[in-house]
Amino acid sequence: MAALINVPAKAKRGDIIEIRTLTSHIMETGFRHTADGALVPRDIITSFTCRYNGTEVFRADLFPAIAANPYLSFFTVAKESGKFEFEWIGDNGYSSSASASITVE
Amino acid sequence: MPTTRRQFLSIAGGVAAAGSIPIVTLRPLEATPAMLTTAIRNVVGEAPVRTGKVKLDIPPLVENGNTVPMTVSVASPMTADDYVKSIHVFNEKNPQPNVGNFHLGPSSGRAQISTRIRLADTQKVVAIARLSDDTFWQVTAEIVVTLAACTEEMN
């Protein structure tokens, strides 16, 4: 459930800012076998969404080819002070969220 | 009429032959270039995919395929009428061809994403960008992997 979010605390209006997120998840591919031959069922995060004051600014569909503990970095334009909300959704009803605030001058 | 030995053997032989078919139709554990083409067609449809505009930053030689850093950037002004709608990343030889779809918009400011991916083998990675005018641009990178991901046994 733990997530690391990196959003600049302050930005000038119109600045392009980088957002980096890292969340802990096994991202089990569903293609691996145990030593006695049983298939390990898939357990991955399938979707990530970032909302900026309620408006979606970035979304990603993830597949088993994404490494464990998915790291994502992307950009957005700092428009107004407010809150970024992050949401990860995955197999077996997995859901996790985080948020970060920004002051835009 | 009682079944003769000859009839019995011919039926038994037929059953044995039918039983062997599922072994032949098992899904390959490795994606094939055909699966890569199909996955790309699922995204772009019939539209032509041109080479250019997209840049794929990924190490050419990877020791550990379990976590490979990757950055995709697209040359785009990212204005309200000329921006990147989405970036799609595919691979050639993992068990399945998709890596990720990343949806951007004019408010992204810069068309660039980074993540870490798994590579099961030495192979080709393809990044495709869909622009706001619905044209598709791609770039391909060859990556040599010495330790494969995805299919190893769990201990």
Image (cartoon, coloured by chain):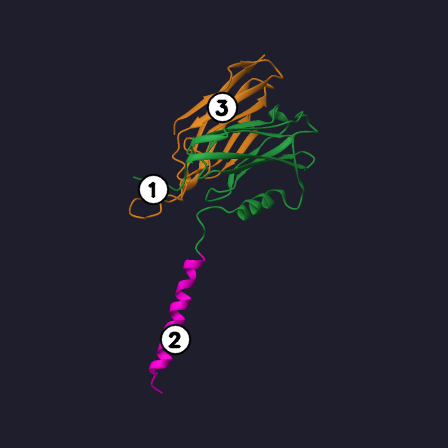
Mark found first going from the N terminus, 1 or 2: 2
Residues tagged by mark 1 and mark 2 found on one chain of the structure: yes
Q: Which residues are magenta?
A: B1-25
Crowding near the residue tagged with mark 2, few <14, some 14–19, many ≥20 C-alpha atoms within 10 Å = few
Tell whether B28 sits left or right of B126: left
Viewport quadrant of the C terminus of chain B: top left
Q: Residue furthest bottom?
A: B1
Identity of the residue drawn at 67% across and 33% down: B132
Crowding near the residue tagged with mark 3, few <14, some 14–19, many ≥20 C-alpha atoms within 10 Å = some
Residue B80 picture quarter = top right
Q: What amino acid is at disc 3?
A: Arg
Reading the image, the residue beneath label 1 is: B153
Q: Position of residue A36 (x, y in %)?
A: 29, 47
Viewport quadrant of the N terminus of chain B: bottom left
Reading the image, the residue beneath label 2 is: B11
Q: What amino acid is at disc 1?
A: Glu
**The color chain A is rendered in:** orange
Q: Depth-wise, is mark 3 or mark 2 nearer the camera?
A: 2
Is B95 included in the stretch rendered in magenta?
no
Crowding near the residue tagged with mark 1, few <14, some 14–19, many ≥20 C-alpha atoms within 10 Å = some
Q: Position of residue B47 (x, y in %)?
A: 67, 43
Q: What amino acid is at disc 2?
A: Ile
- B8 or A62, which is in the foreground? B8
